Image: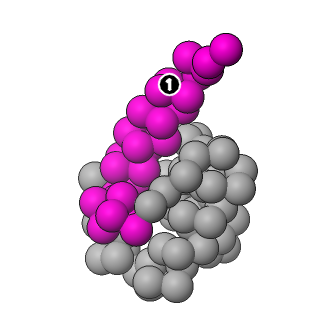
Amino acid sequence: MSTIRELLVELTGTAEYADPGAIGDDVDLAASGIDSGDLVRLVLLVEQRLGVEIGAEDMEELRSIADYERFVAGRSTAGAGGGA
C-alpha cells in the first residue's frame, strides 16, 4: 500500500482508501468523499511525515492519490541530491 493511501486510511478511518480496486489512483479525492478540511489535514500529514512541503499553488493541482504520489516522489528525488 502506498504511503498516501496509508495516510488516507489513518486520516479518514476508511479502509477503502487502502484498496486501489475500491478507489482508483486517479479518482478525484473530493469526489470520493474527502472534504476540504480532510484535504488540508492530508497535506499537513504529508509535510510532517514525509518532509515534503506543499504550497498553496501545489494544493490546487493535487486532486488524486496518483497526483500526491507523483508530487511526493518528485520532491523526494529533487531533495535527495542534497548540497554541500
Horizontal and vertical percent for residue 25? 35, 49
Viewer-side residue, 46 vs 4: 46
Residue 49 sits inside the magenta stretch: no
- Magenta stretch: give its range: 56-84
Q: In which quarter of the image is the C terminus?
A: top right
Q: Mark 1 points at which residue?
A: 77
SS under mark 1: helix
Picture residue at 52% right of the left edge, 85% below the top: 37
The image quadrant that residue 76 belongs to is: top right
- Chief secondary structure of the magenta span? helix
Q: In which quarter of the image is the N terminus?
A: top right
**Compared to 54, does 75 lie above or below?**
above
Q: What kind of residue is marked 1?
A: Thr
**Compared to 60, does 31 lie above or below?**
below
Answer few, some or many: residues within 10 Å of disc 1's Cα (few below 14, many 20 plus, some between 14 and 19): few
Residue 72 sits inside the magenta stretch: yes
Horizontal and vertical percent for residue 61? 28, 60
Q: Is any part of residue 21 visible from this angle?
A: no
Horizontal and vertical percent for residue 6? 63, 53
